[in-house]
Amino acid sequence: MLFSKPPAVLALEDGTVYYGYAFGFPGRTIGEVVFNTSMTGYQEILTDPSYKGQIVTMTYPHIGNYGVSVYDMESNRPYAQGFIVREFSRTASNHRANQDLQSFMEQHRIVGIEGIDTRALTRRLRTGGVVKGVIHHGEVDDDLEAELVRLAREHPDIDGRDMTPEVTTPLPYARPSFNEHPRVVVMDFGIKHSIVYKLEQAGAEVIVVPAQTTPAQIMALDPYGLVLSNGPGDPDGPKYAHDTVWQLLGLLPTYGICLGHQLLGLAVGGRTFKLRYGHHGANTPVKNVVTGAVEITSQNHNYAVDIDSIPGRQFVATHINLNDGTLEGMAHQRYPVFSVQYHPEASPGPHDADYLFRRFIEEVNAFEGATALPAAGTGSLIGTL
Amino acid sequence: MPRRDDIHKILILGSGPIVIGQAAEFDYSGTQACKALRSAGYEVVLINSNPATIMTDPEVADRTYIEPLTPEFVEKVIAAEKPDALLPTLGGQTALNLAMALWEAGTLQKHGVELIGANHEAIQKGEDRQRFQQAMAKIGIKTPAGKMVGTLDEALEFVQTIGYPAIIRPSYTLGGTGGGVAYDEAQFRQVVRQGLHDSPVHTVLVEQSVLGWKEYELEVMRDHNDTVVIICSIENVDPMGVHTGDSITVAPAQTLSDKEYQRLRDYSIAIIREIGVDTGGSNIQFAVNPANGDVIVIEMNPRVSRSSALASKATGYPIAKIAALLAVGYHLDELPNDITKETKAAFEPTIDYVVTKIPRFAFEKFPGASRELGTQMRSVGEVMAIGRTFKESLQKALRSLELDVRGATSDMNLAQLEALLYPNPFRLGAVIELLRRGKSVQVLHEKTRIDPWFLAQLKEIVDGETELRRLPEPQRWSWEQWREIKRLGYSDAELARLRGLDAAEVRSLRLEHAGAPVYKTVDTCAAEFEAYTPYHYSTYEWEDEVAPSQKDKVLILGSGPNRIGQGVEFDYATVHAVWALRDAGYETIMANSNPETVSTDYDTADRLYFEPLTYEDVLNIVEHEKPKGVIVQLGGQTPLKLARPLDDAGVPIWGTPAAAIHAAEDRDTFHALCTRLGIPQPQGGVATAPADAKRLAQQIGYPVMVRPSYVLGGRAMKVVHDDAELDGYLHEVYAELPDNPSILVDDFIEGAIEVDVDALSDGDTTVVAGIMEHIEGAGIHSGDSACITPPVTLSDDVIATLQAYSVQLADAIGVRGLINIQYVIKDGEVFVIEANPRASRTVPYLSKAIGHPLAKYAALIAAGRSLAELGFTEMPHPKLYSVKEVVLPFLKFRDILPVLGPEMRSTGESMGISHDPALAYLKAELGAGVALPSEGTARLIGDGLEALGERLAEQGFEVVRGAQPGDAEDGPDYALLIDVAHTRELRRALENGVPYATTLQAATWMVAAMAAARSGELEVRALQDA
């Protein structure tokens, strides 16, 4: 086994080639290479639709130790474009495991590579920024390597692309509700299941609608709250969503998460920018500038909102990243509208930001129903988050 | 709330002598705290009775008191220093208990001293089992079903409801002393009785057993702003039932899904808040049922612990330093992360490697003691290793142990191996060997409850071995094959053994085909940010990220795992070398494998390599860094035994040359040298076979001292008085030693005084630094004997002779640095026993007694300075007497008689300083936890005690003779025991904490000390006032 592992390579667009071993589904895959520093939660990461188009490198070297569980799916299948690990575990040891990582990846046709120096790769991504890469299973020669590098180079960039159609639900669906809870509509830009669970836990009846749902269609559902979900890609891509959010602004208590936060920023005329290598991990400290509290957050984004670019100071920063000072959360000056760049639903990651779901539902509970026009001067959430 | 300006002077309590369960990790944490608080502008006062620590160096705190850690002495220091606050969370259980006692007695309130870092209420809630259980019930976290009991009857009644096995945990003891698992009523009675006794409050918790559950620890930090972060998760390879200090542990947790891990994290945060630890670090232990994920919290320590030290080294997050700063008001988001500089201390480290810790035991020192591991900690040290995979880090840790773990089990038969699957120090070796012989992971999991993931990893190591045995000759291995083999963690030496080659050959083949290892950085963030901290480990990967600088540098080799005979003293010496050489302008590089040390703090040396101290690993560092010199003489035997092979490989060894070290260690050359110099030695010789030994013994005349050659720390050393005893020794002790070493037979000079001399030589001049007169007579290992300096019974002539011989020996051997020489003196005649041209364990104690940093001088001499340049040209004559006393771990080993002998068994030491020798002895005893009585009954057993009896009677003691009548289970009817006949009575005294003496000399000192205590005032004095 030690000396007969099937070969594989990872070729980056800058010409770097890493030699490793094949695992997962046999074949070839192309995508933007990103790294994630979470030490647990590989299954949640693989199944997070935000990773659409991306090949994920795990910085923790042992991956697959506790197998894969039906309870840890963040969507109905993995969305990551490929998986890079130092060593995948052939043994799945946990009572929750339903299958091992290898069979899970085979089943869902996810190509992986193991045995490479993932720390070197991560350092490369940190210093050189996000790159595109190809994982190829099988022996390679110089010609093939050159070919793989070319493929990586020619692969379309994520920047500017709207990837939401590839991940959003094709049809709206209502989650079964057994309690008299206020209705919340969630726009699915590539939602993680945990967001739905956390909303339900906090006391909401949840209806998930496709990303392209119009404001009128949403209002017709008689919602008491609106959630803008996470999702993949460049927030500049889904222009239609900027319109939708703009039209709904102020009509409903609104809560944006990750891509949802970025869409909110863009909808009100702000600007987003691409981070050099993004934030992908479960250990990022965020300061709530309103309360002074520090929370450890789960993060997965390559873009950030420039709050100063939002005209008219409509939003105030509520949360900032303690590592690099970027914006992590904002609240509208007048309306009960707020958003965070990170993942309060965790999965994987710490639960420190659970309170945001409760805060949102409080707002939803206090909401007296939508009027056609924004109710001026009510309910800004600044100072209460 | 930022830094507090209302406090200025802070008192820090150390942890006292090194004992099992409380070791050098608290030197690390205390030193960090002193440094951090001073750099934040506070004045720091430190009390610790342990001289073998960095923290008690006069330059670490502003005011340093080497005084007993008792409420009386702490109050004296408080009265003298008037501190504003007391920080009790960095000196282990000792400091925490002491702070509690001071609070409860009202001492702190009386002097207006505020407890910072943890409040009285939180400490009690965390430490008192019953209150802890109530607190957990309140926040809905399960604890094992248990009941706090104060009597055996109560315990027996409760155990009916939970059944056996049951766990017994005494309240407020460290390292689980007195606790254990009981499988039946008889055992239960015994453990409960012991536990009730050992607990200072005489209560024990009787608890439902969760044996075999998975065990985890989380290290948690909280600040005044209620920010809580988890620094590290640790998973025990040995499941529940083995004390975590005795378990093989791994960081981070390996077999928890994110959902399960986050549950432990949520619980930890809820617990630290509920217990009310305002600021600082805590350690929380959980048991997880592998069948269904049920979680039970086992305990929490509201203080910095051994696991915190491990977590700090495992992640690069300086827990003790941050904890100290949080105690004075800083918030986590106000403190920088030293490693990244850009980010803050408010974050959770994420790591991209695997850390394995393996404990090191000393059972061989206690023949007859059970080797079963349980809830009471018995390891004396530990190693840590870092690798990119568990397999690599485990194999690195195994070779860091300096024991042949796998060799010990490789020749056993199946039945012997299977008999080792209960928790014991050989279990890992047995499991590996059984996997090698085809036992399945499933079967071994059922027998050991070790998680299948770990067993599968071990199996991959074993399978790798099988495969590499089948490969063609190593000359034909491909780069890829070499790399995969090295990635499994196999050392060159092991490959040589597996393939029947010479290690040097493997090395050159490996360098040719696979190259050298690369070095990676421990950076707290898995490379997400640029790291500035030079903390590194080796691995076989693609990229080397550690570029050597162009500066002149020195590599200092550390002392490896602590063990009996090689403890914190050597860490002290190597850290001093680092400081001295850094001040002298060199870039300093430290290599060590022991996480419980100051030397492995990433800001001690300019660069830290956390690596096994083997020839291969050290040579790799040397070749990578190309230092100008390597210092081997300060870290004890571990680096010393590398001196010759490194020298042979052309490595520049600084200080005493390798050949000179060898010449002093080799008996024949040393004997020839003494003869040439005209220095008398006790008669002796070397026997190559048991028959020779007898002939030699008869020739020399009994009693003789017998010991195997090249066995360290007095292992298997014995004084025998006749042929029969010698036969017994040869059969029982010698026959068990591997490789049948030759036997040294020496005249044992009865009734002699033993003396240690430490001297420094720069090659031209030799200066004796101090003469230490042993309290106990010759025949007791010098490491176990109390001693005093300056000497009190030696004549000026003898002192002059000792100085002259020492200078002659150091010159003749060619010492450049420190030398330790042992002498015996009988009727005014001086005999030399042995000379070790290296730092000895007396260096820290002597340095403090004379006020000269000897290890620093040694390092500077190694770098080419002369004694004249250092201003150290004649033997110092200190005005005060300093006594060193030892602490021994007898209590942890049932059925062992607490009697001293030629085999060293002490784990630590205390120091007492006074103008009066007897008072210095009294303080040293107090520092070692022995409170001599002032009244009551003194029981005397053995001959020759008449004079002592009279003096005790004069002091008002009721003197009785012989063993205590009645049941062996009864408590002692005396306040002091002197038993020179070495009867079982000693065990009763030991177990009941009654002071006892086993030698006439110690008893004489005790009686003198008690007399002095009546007349003399016990003063406290800061080292800085000398």
Image (cartoon, rainbow, N blue to C red):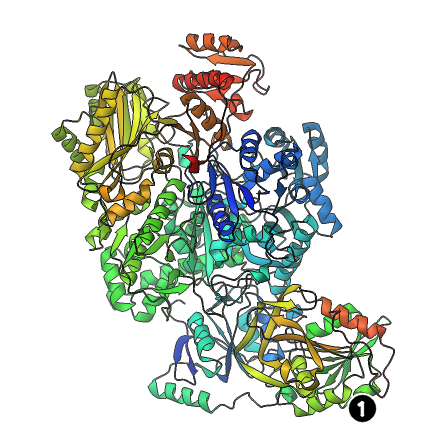
Disc 1 target residue: A216
The answer to whether residue A50 is above or below residue B976 is: below
Q: Quadrant of the N terminus of chain B?
A: bottom right
The answer to whether residue B936 is above or below residue B556 is: above
Image coordinates of residue B683 in percent, x first then y, are 20, 23
Q: Which is more toward the observer, B511 or B422?
A: B511
Left or right of A59 in this view: B633: left
Q: Residue at x 74, y 70 (%)?
A: A383
Q: Residue at x 23, y 51 (%)?
A: B653
Few, some or many residues within 10 Å of mark 1 (<14, 14–19, 20+): few
Q: Residue at x 41, y 38 (%)?
A: B52
Q: Let me know if residue B813 appears in the view.
A: yes
Quadrant hosting residue B872: top left
Left or right of A121 in this view: A322: right
Q: Which is more toward the observer, A180 or A341?
A: A341
Image coordinates of residue A251 in percent, x first then y, are 81, 84
The answer to whether residue A241 is above or below residue B371 is: below
Q: Which is more toward the observer, A186 or A344?
A: A344
Left or right of A195 in this view: B1016: left
